[in-house]
Amino acid sequence: MAAYQRQPVRPQRAWSTQIDGNTVRKAAPEIYIPERREEALPARRAIKRRQQARQMSPAYVLFLSIASVVVLAACIGYLRVQASINSRMSEIQSLEAQLEEMIDLNESARTRIEAASDISQIYRTATEELGMVYPDDSQVIYYDQTEREYVQQYESIPKE
């Protein structure tokens, strides 16, 4: 029992052959991995990748050109729709301003008509400003016309 001592736990490395503990395990066979020439390979790979990047197949070029034409057409269509919307909005604003002017004119005309159709105002204007008076009974002539329901001014009024 004295042979076993507790040792601090160390992380095991993959290449380490030392195993802590009281039982001996079989060592894993070491695999020899030759070192690569790291300096020469990236340069060759980089050159090869650059050459592949420069070479595009005609089908890929055709696909990219068709895709760019479609995107360009979509952008032009979007801009046309946007311009149409802007012109319609400005037209709507001008029509709304015109409508407001017409509403104001209509209200002022309605106010004038209401003021002009006030019977007391008409009587006051006729008697005070224009000097009109009510007719005497001798000046009123009654006329009965049975042929039509209303009187036309184009015919002469018969004298009694």
Image (cartoon, rainbow, N blue to C red):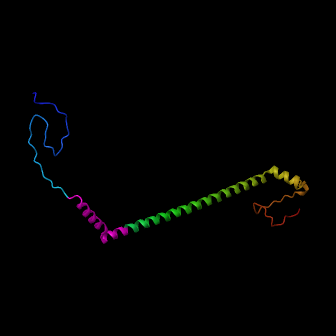
Which is more toward the observer, 115 or 97? 97
Residue at 26%, 65% in the rendered image: 48
Residue at 53%, 61% in the rendered image: 85
Which quadrant of the figure contains the C terminus? bottom right
Q: Quadrant of residue 152?
A: bottom right
Q: Is residue 42 covered in magenta?
A: yes
Q: Position of residue 128 (x, y in %)?
A: 88, 52
Q: Position of residue 75 (x, y in %)?
A: 45, 64
Which quadrant of the figure contains the N terminus? top left
The reply, left or right, for residue 21 in relation to residue 72 is: left
Q: Is residue 63 covered in magenta?
A: yes
Magenta span: 37-66
Q: Position of residue 110 (x, y in %)?
A: 72, 54
Q: Main secondary structure of the magenta part?
A: helix
Q: Quadrant of residue 157?
A: bottom right
The reply, left or right, for residue 96 in relation to residue 83 is: right
Which is more toward the observer, 85 or 29? 29
Q: Position of residue 97 (x, y in %)?
A: 64, 58
Q: Is residue 33 above or below residue 14?
A: below
Residue at 85%, 51% in the rendered image: 124
The reply, left or right, for residue 53 in relation to residue 160 is: left
**Residue, far top:** 1
Which is more toward the observer, 109 or 39? 39
Q: Is residue 24 above or below residue 113?
A: above
**Residue, far bottom:** 58
Which is more toward the observer, 152 or 142? 152
